[in-house]
Image (tube, helix red, strand yellow):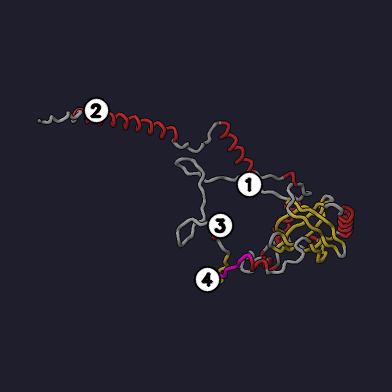
Amino acid sequence: MKTLWKGAVSFGLVNIPVAMYTATENKDLKFHYLHQECMAPVNYKKVCSKCSKEIKTEEIVKGYEFQKGNYVIISEEDLARIPQENTKTIDILDFIKLEQLDPVYFDKSYYLEPASGGDKAYTLIVEAMKKTGKIALAKIMIRSKQSLAALRVKDEHLIMETIFYPDEIRSPASLGKGIGVEKLHEKEIKMAVSLIENLSIDFDPARYQDDYRQALWEMIEAKIAGEEFVSPVPERQAGNVVDLMEALKASVKLAEENKNEGKKKGGPKKAAKTGS
């Protein structure tokens, strides 16, 4: 795995050097858009909506739309003036029980590996967290974004999950809640509870797979095996060469004919006789 970030976990007066790696990967099958006529990939260009012309990256600035059509321009110099302390430190703020953190807060997962000189302190915090059954809440700067994060232990490793801030979680207040509980019959509740209990097992992630992705991949493999695939139509370079040669030959022939025709019409002029 490629190292994404290097820094330290700040735990009281203890600093634990760590390296961070992305813990998950997206295995969705990605498709390219092709031009149906020639089967070549479609390119996407940065085009100004007003000037209707393609623009370069260096011509683009960042703007925050505070009103419809009105923007505040934020430059790299503006961003550099915002204080970003401890950009290489995962600062532990508090310890809580995992069950107190609703899964809706979780965003992305990362592995933390002990870096040089941090092995003992790394093992120490792992053991302490296992014995207390607690997870850590921390803050971290990744690139230019400050994130809230949760550190927990999994298979003797520290895993860090970035989590959303409370104001980033949308309120469900406007959503419907079904009917009132008092309208349910006791037998219906008992049957639903019984069904849940009968379907309850110990969690085993190996039991689950993306059936749609698997079926899609099998379809792709079958099309490849059956040679049901396309390639971009090659440019007619060879044809252009042939056309050019034919045009040259025709031009030479025409020039020769014109030259011969000129000779027939005019021919070499005879010298005029001079009288004495």
| Disc on res. 70 | 4
Q: Earlier in the sequence, mark 1 or mark 2?
A: 1
Is residue 186 at all visible to an observer of this figure?
no
Question: Which of pointers 4 and 1 lies earlier in the amino acid sequence?
Answer: 1
Relative to residue 56, is residue 243 depicted above or below? above
CA separation in Å, label 4 and label 1: 38 Å
Of circles 1 and 2, the one toward us is 2
- Mark 2 to mark 3: distance in Å? 60 Å
- Mark 4 falls on what kind of element? strand
Q: CA distance from mark 1 to mark 2?
A: 71 Å
What residue is disc 3 on?
A: 57
The Cα–Cα distance between marks 2 and 4, rounded to whole angstroms, is 74 Å
Which x, y percent locates residue 126? 86, 55
Q: Residue at x 30, y 29 (%)?
A: 253
Of callouts 2 and 3, the N-terminal one: 3
Q: Nearer the viewer, residue 269 or 229?
A: 269
The quadrant holding residue 249 is top left
Q: Which residue position holds label 1?
A: 28
Q: Which residue lies under the disc numbered 2?
A: 260
Q: Which residues are magenta?
A: 67-76
Decide whether residue 8 is among the magenta residues.
Answer: no
Q: Amino acid at mark 1?
A: Asp
Q: Say which label, 3 or 1, has the lower sequence index.
A: 1
Residue at position x 73%, y 44% in the image: 207
- For the residues bearing labels 1 and 2, Cβ distance under 8 angstroms: no
Point out residue 265 in the picture as x, y percentages from the top left corner: 18, 30
